[in-house]
């Protein structure tokens, strides 16, 4: 099976079975999604969602967070991974939004990465989820799943992102990002992929290689 066949089969299955895939982070504005995505680095969405309601209540606007003290923000996120760095990033991000972008979350990834705490992955998440830009964010789930099932042989995040961007049509790239994240989170997990419950196993390269030759037809 070649790569084009894998993309067609996997795209067809997800389009039919997961047509409304979306982020599991809870938010009520572009600014609040930006906060949540920054907090989600090396942390589960579930834990982030436990802390963001109070953050959102205390800091409804960039100006509110920009005026906050480190101790105030740290106290609200101290049980999240890397709270020191993330508290600084959140305050710096808000201050840059106010000073450089008129308190509006920019649409373009090239501008988003100018914000403290925002790397390429976070920028692509905001651009695709909020503004529908045809970009794909590659996190650890997307990187692992894409290489495992045969959508990419890239050895870096940038290489995997390029393969996915080149092969998924622009109109489905935002959904494809969530397809692969959710699949990696709940089915194609890092330690023990649940191939018996996987709807795309017939297009998966690793699953194909695991089948004894006597069973292949």
Image (cartoon, rainbow, N blue to C red):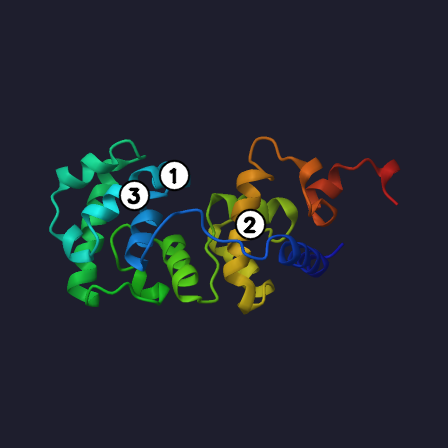
For residue 58, side relative to residue 152 (left or right): left
> Is any atom of residue 143 visible in this view?
no
Q: Which residue is mark 2?
A: 180
Mark 1 nearby-residue class (10 Å; few <14, some 14–19, many ≥20): few
Residue at the spot 45% in from the left edge and 51% down from the top edge: 23
Q: How many marks?
A: 3
Mark 3 nearby-residue class (10 Å; few <14, some 14–19, many ≥20): many
Mark 3, mark 2: which one is toward the viewer? Answer: 3
Residue at the spot 46% in from the left edge and 47% down from the top edge: 139
Closer to the chain start, of discs 1 and 2, is: 1
State how far apart marks 3 and 2 are (Cα).
24 Å
For residue 74, side relative to residue 132 (left or right): left
Task: Classify mark 2: helix, strand or loop.
Answer: helix
Task: Classify mark 3: helix, strand or loop.
Answer: helix
Residue at the spot 67% in from the left edge and 42% down from the top edge: 198
Q: Which residue is mark 1?
A: 42
Q: Evaluate if marks 1 and 2 touch, with contact meaning CB atoms under 8 Å apart.
A: no
Q: Which residue is mark 3?
A: 52
For residue 204, side relative to residue 131 (left or right): right
How far across and down, in percent of the image, does residue 2 sit? Answer: 73, 57
Quarter of the view holding residue 206? top right
């Amino acid at each position: 099976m070649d790569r084009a066949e894998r993309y067609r089969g996997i795209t067809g299955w997800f389009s039919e079975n997961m047509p409304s895939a979306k982020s599991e982070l809870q938010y009520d504005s572009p600014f609040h999604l930006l906060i949540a995505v920054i907090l989600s680095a090396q942390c589960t969405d579930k834990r982030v969602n436990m802390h963001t309601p109070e953050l959102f209540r205390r800091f409804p606007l960039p100006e509110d967070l920009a005026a906050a003290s480190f101790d105030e923000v740290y106290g609200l996120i101290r049980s999240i991974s890397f709270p020191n760095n993330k508290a600084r990033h959140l305050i710096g991000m808000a201050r840059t939004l106010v000073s450089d972008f008129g308190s509006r979350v920019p649409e373009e990834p090239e501008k988003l990465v100018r914000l403290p705490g925002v790397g390429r992955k976070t920028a692509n998440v905001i651009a695709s989820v909020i503004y529908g830009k045809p970009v794909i964010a590659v996190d650890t789930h997307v990187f692992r799943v894409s290489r495992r099932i045969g959508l990419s042989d890239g050895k870096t995040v940038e290489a995997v992102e390029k393969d996915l961007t080149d092969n998924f049509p622009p109109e489905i790239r935002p959904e494809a990002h969530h397809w692969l994240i959710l699949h990696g989170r709940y089915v194609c997990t890092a330690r023990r992929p649940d191939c018996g419950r996987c709807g795309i196993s017939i297009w998966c390269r690793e699953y194909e290689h695991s089948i004894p030759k006597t069973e292949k037809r």
